[in-house]
Image: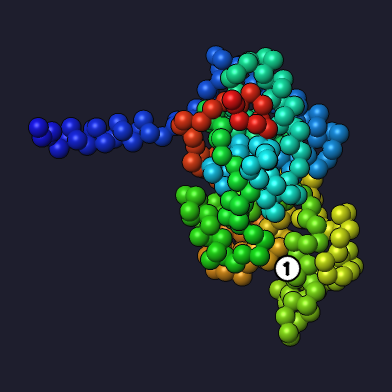
Amino acid sequence: MEFPTIVVLLLLTLSTTLSKAELDANYYDKTCPQIEDIISETVQSASKQDPKVPARILRMFFHDCFIRGCDASILLDSTDTNKAEKDGPPNLSVHSFYVIDDAKAKLEKACPHTVSCADIIAIAARDVVTLSGGPSWEVLKGRKDGRISKASDTINLPAPTLNVTQLIQSFAKRGLSVKDLVALSGGHTLGFSHCSSFQSRIHNFSLLNDIDPTLNTNFALGLKNKCPKPNTTDPNAGQFLDSTASVFDNDYFIQILGGKGLFSSDQSLVDDSRTRWIVEAFAKDQSVFFKEFVDSMLKLGNVRVLENGEVRLNCKVVNN
């Protein structure tokens, strides 16, 4: 039996709609109306105790969404038979998982078996941005938690040594544009980096230059003083990612325009015509950056949303 063309098109549209999990800002309005307050209070309390929490939570969200989509796979502990994402090399410096675990424990008491760990990360990421002086937005909710987490998959995270072409390709694989790349890179306005992530730029950079010539000279000499020798193992040695590292603002873009981008991936955004004009626009007008950052965070939060996942009872382990 043959269906008329219009019927086939309607069936295809319906199939596509049903195959994609839909997120909704009001997803928990009836089942857990206190979700935002519980997460916000947890994040604020943790941030008062440890000022590093905001940068860590924001980075956690990026690293979670970039692997298998925003499915909280970064929260799963390794087992005897599986090395999980959080133990992959790029994630060894991701911390503050306890904040998400604390929020989850409170939510399980208030609304048992209801709120996914993936949604907690997404809401907490928004909260740390707002708490640090950045914009706020309605977080879309309804994500499910994944059951797969492999350390080997962390090789797909964008490294601080990538050039713009490699970064564009990495982001495009996740449905993210060049504008999203630059806007989300602005998340580096929060936080601190250990010497290992940038020491190749300040020691034996090339046969001709000991220091990366794209670095501001005085800035580079300051970095050399903080990281005086290659392969330093001092866990406290490093550099804040911009000059206002606890405030969410557009200073990151101003710094990289001045040759003070810590990572070569950051500095490359200035050296490529596809991205420089966006950097300049964000450096000139913080409100433009804030608007585009929110838009890109919403897009990132929609990457590969699971339709058939679960709501974990404990964010560290899959349900039995």
- Rendered image quadrant of residue 280: bottom right
Q: Position of residue 242 (x, y in %)?
A: 77, 55
- Rendered image quadrant of residue 10: top left
For the image, the number of numbered tags is 1
Quarter of the rendering occupied by the C terminus: top right
Is 88 on the left or on the right of 8, as rendered? right
The residue sitting at 59% across, 26% down in the picture is 319
Residue 34 versus residue 249 in the image, above or below: above
The residue sitting at 75% across, 82% down in the picture is 209
The residue sitting at 79% across, 52% down in the picture is 192
Residue 91 or residue 137, whichever sits in front: 91
Q: Residue furthest front?
A: 80
Q: Position of residue 309 (x, y in %)?
A: 51, 31
Residue 213 versus residue 145 in the image, above or below: below
Residue 251 or residue 165, whichever sits in front: 165
Q: Is residue 152 visible?
A: yes
Q: Secondary structure at mark 1?
A: loop
Is 19 on the left or on the right of 277, as rendered? left
Residue under numbered circle 1: 259
Residue 272 or residue 315, whichever sits in front: 315
Q: Residue furthest left?
A: 1
- Coloured how? rainbow
Q: Are there few (<14), some (14-19), or many (20+) residues within 10 Å of tag 1? A: some
Residue 217 or residue 167, whichever sits in front: 167
Looking at the rendered structure, the kind of residue marked 1 is Gly
The residue sitting at 49% across, 50% down in the picture is 174
Quarter of the rendering occupied by the N terminus: top left
Q: Position of residue 73 (x, y in %)?
A: 61, 39
